[in-house]
Image (spheres, helix red, strand yellow):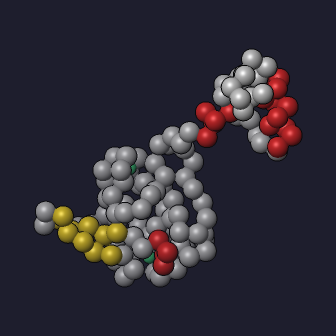
Amino acid sequence: MFEQGDGTKLNDDAVTKLCAKFGIELPKEEKGQAVSAAAVPRPLAAAATGPHTAFCPNPACPSHFEYFVDGRRFLRPDREKQDPVGGKFCAICGEVLEHSCPNCGAPVHEGGVCSYCGSPYVAVL
Ligand SMILES: [Zn+2]
Ligand SMILES: [Zn+2]
């Protein structure tokens, strides 16, 4: 019925029962809204954990890839090398790994510069 667009019976009670059946934890403030709203990513959501999600903030770490934009030097962390197992420390130099942008706290993504605040992940002198 829900799949065919008849959402009239989809009330709080039905959503709660469905979530319980499928083992989904329903966030309290999302109750009563469409279930998919809970899956919308937010910039300051908890950072992802697991292999290849963190980066090494040490500018001297030899695993960074160096590149230049308008004569300015940047370092792009190689997260496959630095975070091969989802651990706490850089596999190359031993520095504590970062899971979020040091400047704004947003979860890290591919590349060398945070798309949320524009700050480079690895500070370069
Ligand atoms: Zn490192
Ligand atoms: Zn940022």
Residue 60: percent from left, percent from top: 34, 77
| Placement of 25 over or under 84, stated as above or below | above
Task: Identify the residue at the far top of this view.
Answer: 8
Residue 21 image-quadrant placement: top right
Q: Nearer the viewer, residue 125 or 18?
A: 18
| Placement of 15 over or under 107, stated as above or below | above
Name the side, left or right, on which 24 lies relative to 42: right
Task: Identify the residue at the far front of this view.
Answer: 4
* Quadrant location of the N terminus in the rendered image: top right
Residue 77: percent from left, percent from top: 39, 70
| Placement of 90 over or under 69, stated as above or below | below
Residue 88: percent from left, percent from top: 58, 69
* Residue 85 at least partly seen: yes
Residue 25: percent from left, percent from top: 76, 40
Which residue is at 51% across, 59% downward?
A: 99
Total tally of numbered discs in the picture? 0
Which residue is at 85% across, 38% downward?
A: 20
* Quadrant location of the C terminus in the rendered image: bottom left
Residue 124 image-quadrant placement: bottom left
